[in-house]
Image (cartoon, coloured by chain):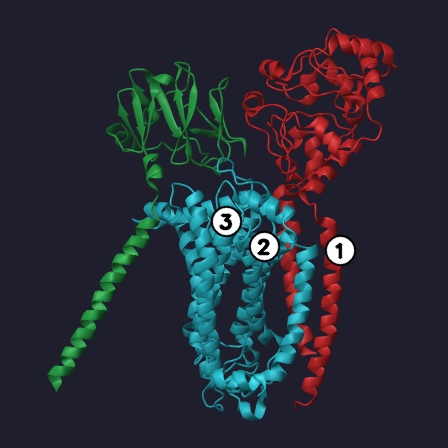
Chain colours: A red, B green, C cyan
């Protein structure tokens, strides 16, 4: 009947408008986000040697411990945080879980030439040119042996990101002080508290995987996260940005049920009242 | 009888008029409350000592909530722009508002290339602040200024500024 | 004595109810589009109440505002997220209701004599709601909040002579700043809602005096062909409201991104413009008219102002003796062209203004004004045809 026709016309106009303003416009504005490459196929060195974890441990102590701590084995960095910030403008990360977070092919290339792997010519860590391929493989094998097996998204973010990024809604402050970060990166990196809500998943995947592909000229380094760590990190960011999602969905369901019952009741009353109208 | 009515009317008009005067005064006071606060107005005029800038260096200072780039030019920089050059005893300066004329982002100075490069859409400006590449439609804007020896006063129009605009 | 009699002795309750609800009759031949006024009152009440509860935790200070909304209200306060969602989705949906309500008025000729004051008070309400939305959007102090306010207040610089000083006066500073936030807060929370309530009262009173229009635009004998407002018309209203609220709550809980743009979850940064700035959907059409005349900034500005004002003049642009669009084939064409054009302008307002979009935008802006120009022409044609037929004036 007539009112259904009017409702139908309104619905069509609203749906076309919604499509144009939301999905269509977003596509036109933000275009094509590049596909992430979790294989890091642009890095040319191949890791095809089996490393020895025991040799890796002593190599770690000789070559890495000067700057990096390894909490999993209670190894403190020889350089303290303040000296490190002064020297490098950034606090070197603890490496306990690095082998679980980062792709090993990436890590191999990274140790040979951090600036190229991270695509940041000003990256603070120097190349480990004193190490042979076998030695690098040993270190990676050692790090794999100490890394946590089932790392959480929160841990990925903590070990991988918080030397530069704060998460103030979770009371997490970046390990490096702001004035050093400004010197290192040109500006203080943005807080991550709401990135799970201000950016969509596609964007975050592409950005974490290869910042330059989404924001050319950015000072954020590529960090070589595996696909699994990337997904865990993004899920964590989404969860902290939208902590009431489950509650909202649950309450929403029952509110809709309540309203639908209300529709039935009001329709019944309307029909009854209008029956007596000529 | 007629006299009484006209006097009553006159008084009514007088009261109405008098109320309007009061309302006008109140509206004026309300209008004034929206003016910028003294500390904001004070920051509307900013003085800066140009001798603090090294040759080839760009300093960024805040003026009226906008970044202002102050570049002390070196001889090898693009300088054939008499209408955009501030000549002082210390040498030639470029003083421009650091807001890209395309969509309002803040360009970054690249010392190796002697250009300002806007991160948003790639616009480029030379050492005179003139747009040389990309979407920007106009050169960077020059703020009103006055020279007091080596001190530049932003926010006041001096003769040098007026000569540039001519 | 019963309580109702005690009250009646002191407040004349029975008489009031009889006059305003039971004896008040509305035409029978009105479809559910006539229920949108009630939906607007409902939505205003929902916005007022949700806004009140947000007000208890919101901090109107440029350093505190963003976190008070996105941390305190959205994460810490019990059901804070619910009140925020209701308020944001409500603010957006109220414009959908407004546009449908206005479209009904245009189509059925509800602006014609003697309903001009209804139309004008309605127009003022549209402006008041727009101002409320604009001032409210700055309050979360997100990236889009800041840059929308910065861009739109900059437009006023173009007014001759007083422009630049006017803009500084509006902002209370050289750019949108804390002073702008606090005064927009005062306007949004007190001044504008009070004005809305006053004009709602006037609008409803004006409707009451002249009576509702109906689908056929005919003057009807309400005693014979009307239905009592209570309980007959209200029973239909309850049903329509319940259906609407079901849709509304679906959006509040499950599909709210259109009313809570992602860019606004980034704190305002006066030194970094987002790559794409755009207003909320209900302003997109006027935004597009502003950009539509891409070859002249001044023409765009004048067109922008005109596009928001012309609609007020409808009762004088269209004085055709035939009231309802139902019986006006030429007008129907103009109407639907206008509706589609408004939809096109709205979508274009969100798209980058380059290439083919710029040209379609110019064309669509011209069609928009074409509608208003066509009205007196159509009215004259209809007047000629109408002469000699039976008088069906309202």
Q: In the image, is residue B125 above or below residue A63?
A: below
On the image, the x and y values in percent for residue A24 come to 65, 50
Residue drawn 28% across the image and 33% down it:
B156
Alpha carbons under labels 1 and 3: distance apart: 31 Å
Tag shown at residue C347 = 2
Q: For this rendering, which residue is in front, B148 or C353? A: B148
Please report, as a chain letter, where disc 1 is located: A
Answer with left or right where residue C384 lies relative to residue B47.
right
Residue C182 at x, y percent in the picture = 44, 48
Q: Residue at x 65, y 55 (%)?
A: C82
Q: Are marks 2 and 3 on the same chain?
A: yes
Q: Nearer the viewer, mark 1 or mark 3?
A: 1
Label 2 marks a residue whose chain is: C
Give me the residue at 70% from left, 80% from top: A269
Q: Which residue is mark 3?
A: C138
Q: What is the CA distance from the residue labelled 2 to the residue labelled 1? A: 33 Å
- Indicate the secondary structure of the residue bearing disc 2: helix
Q: Is residue C67 visible?
A: yes
The label on residue A250 is 1
Q: Quadrant of the C terminus of chain A?
A: bottom right
């Amino acid at each position: 009947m007539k009112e259904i026709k009017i409702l139908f016309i309104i619905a069509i106009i609203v749906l076309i408008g919604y499509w144009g303003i939301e999905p269509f416009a977003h596509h036109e504005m933000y275009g094509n986000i590049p596909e992430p490459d979790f294989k890091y196929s642009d890095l040319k060195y191949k890791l095809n040697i089996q490393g020895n974890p025991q040799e890796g441990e002593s190599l770690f102590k000789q070559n890495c411990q000067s700057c990096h701590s390894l909490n999993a084995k209670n190894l403190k960095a020889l350089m303290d945080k303040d000296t490190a910030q002064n020297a490098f403008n950034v606090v070197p990360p603890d490496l306990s879980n690095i082998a679980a977070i980062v792709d090993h092919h990436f890590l191999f290339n990274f140790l040979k030439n951090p600036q190229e792997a991270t695509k940041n010519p000003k990256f603070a860590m120097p190349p480990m040119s004193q190490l042979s391929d076998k030695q690098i493989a040993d270190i990676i094998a050692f790090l794999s042996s100490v890394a946590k097996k089932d790392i959480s998204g929160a841990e990925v973010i903590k070990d991988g990101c918080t030397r530069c990024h704060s998460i103030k809604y979770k009371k997490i402050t970046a390990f490096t002080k702001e004035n050093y970060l400004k010197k290192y990166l040109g500006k203080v990196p943005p807080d991550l508290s709401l990135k799970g809500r201000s950016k969509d998943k596609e964007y975050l995947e592409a950005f974490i995987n290869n910042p330059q592909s989404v924001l050319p000229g950015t000072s954020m380094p590529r960090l070589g996260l595996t696909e699994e760590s990337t997904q865990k990190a993004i899920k964590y960011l989404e969860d902290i940005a939208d902590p009431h999602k489950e509650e909202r969905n649950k309450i929403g369901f029952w509110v809709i049920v309540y309203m639908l019952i209300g529709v039935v009741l009001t329709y019944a009353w309307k029909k009854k009242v209008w029956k007596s109208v000529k | 009888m007629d006299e009484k009515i006209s006097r009553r009317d006159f008084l009514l008009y007088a009261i109405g008029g008098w109320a309007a005067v009061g309302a006008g005064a109140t509206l004026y006071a309300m209008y004034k409350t929206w003016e910028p606060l003294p500390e904001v107005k004070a920051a509307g005029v900013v003085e800066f000592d140009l001798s603090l800038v090294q040759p080839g260096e760009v300093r960024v200072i805040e003026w009226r909530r906008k970044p202002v780039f102050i570049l002390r030019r070196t001889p090898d920089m693009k300088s054939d722009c008499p209408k955009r050059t501030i000549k002082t005893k210390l040498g030639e300066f470029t003083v421009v508002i650091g807001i890209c004329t395309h969509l309002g982002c803040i360009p970054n100075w690249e010392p190796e290339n002697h250009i300002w490069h806007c991160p948003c859409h790639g616009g480029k400006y030379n050492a005179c602040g003139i747009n040389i590449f990309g979407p920007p439609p106009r050169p960077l804007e020059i703020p009103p200024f006055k020279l007091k020896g080596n001190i530049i006063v932003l926010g006041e129009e001096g003769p040098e500024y007026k000569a540039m605009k001519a | 004595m019963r309580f109702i009699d005690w009250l009646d002795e002191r407040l004349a309750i029975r008489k009031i109810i009889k006059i305003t609800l039971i004896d008040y009759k509305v035409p029978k031949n009105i479809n559910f589009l006539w229920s949108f006024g009630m939906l607007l009152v409902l939505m205003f009440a929902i916005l007022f109440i949700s806004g009140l509860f947000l007000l208890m935790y919101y901090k109107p200070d440029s350093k505190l505002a963003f976190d008070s909304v996105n941390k305190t209200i959205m994460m810490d306060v019990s059901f804070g997220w619910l009140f925020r969602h209701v308020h944001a989705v409500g603010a957006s949906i109220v414009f959908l209701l407004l546009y449908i309500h206005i479209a009904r008025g245009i189509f059925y000729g509800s602006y014609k004599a003697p309903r001009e004051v209804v139309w004008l008070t309605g127009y003022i309400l549209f402006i008041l709601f727009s101002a409320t939305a604009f001032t409210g959007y700055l309050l979360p102090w997100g990236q889009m909040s800041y840059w929308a306010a910065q861009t739109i207040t900059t437009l006023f610089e173009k007014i001759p002579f007083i422009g630049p000083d006017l803009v500084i006066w509006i902002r209370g500073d050289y750019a949108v700043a804390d002073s702008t936030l606090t005064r927009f807060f005062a306007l949004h929370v007190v001044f504008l809602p009070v004005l809305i309530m006053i004009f709602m009262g006037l609008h409803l009173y004006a409707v009451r005096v002249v009576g509702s229009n109906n689908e056929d635009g005919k003057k009807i004998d309400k005693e014979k062909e009307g239905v009592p407002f209570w309980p007959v018309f209200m029973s239909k209203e309850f049903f329509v409201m319940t259906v609407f609220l079901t849709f509304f709550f679906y959006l509040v809980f499950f599909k709210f991104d259109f009313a809570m743009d992602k860019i606004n979850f980034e704190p305002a940064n006066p030194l970094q413009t987002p790559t794409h700035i755009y207003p909320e959907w209900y302003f997109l059409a006027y935004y597009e008219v502003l950009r539509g005349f891409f070859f002249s900034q001044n023409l765009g500005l004048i067109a922008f102002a005109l596009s928001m004002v012309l609609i007020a003049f409808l009762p004088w642009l269209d004085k055709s003796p035939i009231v309802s669009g139902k019986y006006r084939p030429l007008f129907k064409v103009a109407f639907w062209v206008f509706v589609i054009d408004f939809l096109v302008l709205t979508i274009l307002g969100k798209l980058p203004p380059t290439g083919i979009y710029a040209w379609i935008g110019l064309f669509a802006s011209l069609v928009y004004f074409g509608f208003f120009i066509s009205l007196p022409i159509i009215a004259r044609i209809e007047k000629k045809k109408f002469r000699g037929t039976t008088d069906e004036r309202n």
